[in-house]
Amino acid sequence: MTESSRPSPVILIVPAEEHRTVLTDEFASRYGRDYDVQVTTDVLDVTDFAAALIAGGQHIALIAVDFALDIDAVDVLDVLRNVSPSSRRIVLVAMGTFGASLDELRPALAVGRLDTYLLIPQGPRDEEFHTAIAEYLSDWATSTSTPEVAGVRIVDDGTQIEVAGIRDFLDRMAAPWTRYQPDSPVGRELLAEAGEGAALPVVSAFGRPPLTGATEQLVASTFYGSPADLGDDYVADLAIIGAGPAGLAAAVYGASEGLRTVVLESEAVGGQAGTSSMIRNYLGFPRGVSGMRLAFRARLQASRFGARIFTGRPAEGVSVGDLHEIAYDGGVVRARAVLIACGVRYRRLGVPALEDLVGLGVYYGAATSVAREMEGRDVFIVGGGNSAGQAAIHLARFARSVTIIVRRQTLSETMSAYLVNEIAMQRTIRVRTGARVVDGGGDGRLEWIDLEVGPSTERHDADGLFLLLGAEPGCDWLPDEVSRDRRGFVLTGRDIPKSAWRGDLPPAALETAVPGIFAAGDVRAGSMKRVASASGEGAGAVAQVHAHLAPAPT
């Protein structure tokens, strides 16, 4: 289907009669070019109205319901969610009833029955209103719809397991992509350009020659440059290992304060936080923010201050000296100070049959890029942390059923209350406590899993298994001089054994046992394992870097 023949996504408005004109004009004037703005005041028939739109091949991007309806607006959204679970849901409130509406809307918002409530515009150019609408439409487009512009083109025949990782990387980097079969016109064109016998998958982007036999690592390291581009004599003031919230915050503050700042990231910018479909408890984002969008904005911010960020460049070792040297695949970055902010990685499940199906229905992390492919399917999530909760809520927009599997007896032991409450309200999400996955399989892709629950084993049909297991540090490459605890997390400040102190005073709060090497975020022993705290530590580390780099007093 070409772009011109593809049905426009729908904005569905359900206004009270007294607000119909103003709301129709407000939405049609701003969004009528790119969206099919549909308006109905027939509340009793609204479900059939929405179902007819979907049956006609349209997707409903956003549903806006007037609080002034004769029936409960949130109940209307509940009914419409059954018809179009991926739609963003908003309640519109008139100025005169705003205060009275909050007692009803706040509890509904807290458990995810709606995405937000907004004041109906009182006049022209209500940019706060339209900023909110645009954010929700953008969030829907990036997580639900097919990209209109093929920024990256992928050619595969559906059997290359590497494609799942490539797509996930591109989504996390906010790079739109489109897949093509080898016998399609675009597929044949790219294969001809790649040369006879080119191995699939083939990936083309940014005016570079096509990559053949592409992997996530190859795409990440090829398309976003190399530290070698900085030159043989380049010395960074601050080299940051890891581009999660801690590393990005340090990059922003370091570069903005004049430090020559380089960031090495082994995967996509954003770290584990970048895979979160929606972070709702991060300061300053009352409507929530996806991990991808937060990472994208932070990357732009750091880059505009001059930080150089390189993806697909895992650190392989650090040599300690007056200038520390970070070894990576293909070279060395020299720096006067180093911040270890590589975060943590998910533990492996350790079931061989399921490890063989990674990328074929089994995924480590939230894998938001494949969520829309789970439409009408049964999926399982292993993990009890916030990332698992966010993934479950996101997948529930598509899947027929979502089952969270945890060994503990309750989710509340490890998950934030707002997520636990929202999960409890989702009719398609169930929680299996005291359970673990012990086996699984399928013909070429995942089809079933076995759960061990107490003394018995249960077999379940499964189309997707998302593994968000407990975290472990991925920094075995650090030198012995950097002290770590028994689990491998990096020790800083007073947590460092006194025998490793330099004199009678401990290192600075975020400094390791090696002068000039610091740690922040999830990789640091004792950290909170939250986005906000990691960002704070990354920013705070820059002040300590400045102190380290300052000339000694005379």
Image (tube, rainbow, N blue to C red):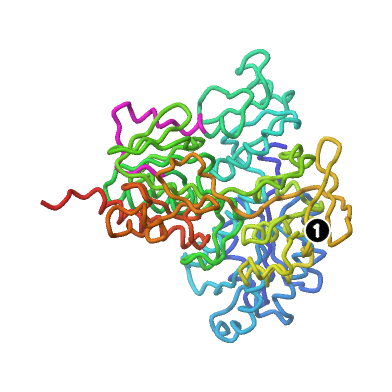
- As rendered, which of 158 and 35 lies closer to the eye? 158
Q: For residue 67: magenta?
A: no
Label 1 residue SS: strand
User: Furthest residue to the front?
Assistant: 499
- As rendered, which of 307 and 323 lies closer to the eye? 323
Circle 1: residue type: Ser
User: Furthest residue to the bottom?
Assistant: 100
- As rendered, which of 348 and 101 lies closer to the eye? 348
Q: Residue at x 56, y 30 (%)?
A: 218
Horizontal and vertical percent for residue 102? 59, 82
Q: Is residue 151 left or right of residue 7?
A: left
Q: For residue 237: magenta?
A: yes
Q: How many marks?
A: 1
Camera sees residue 390: yes
Q: Residue at x 29, y 52 (%)?
A: 502
Camera sees residue 33: no
Q: Residue at x 84, y 60 (%)?
A: 453
Q: Which residue is mark 1?
A: 401
Horizontal and vertical percent for residue 513? 37, 50
Horizontal and vertical percent for residue 225? 44, 31
Q: Residue at x 55, y 66 (%)?
A: 287
Crowd rating for badge 1 (residues with CA inside 10 Å; few <14, some 14–19, many 20+): many
Q: Is residue 451 above or below residue 260?
A: below
Quadrant that contains the N terminus: top right
Q: Is residue 155 left or right of residue 289?
A: right
- As rendered, which of 40 and 357 lies closer to the eye? 357
Magenta stretch, residue numbers? 221-240
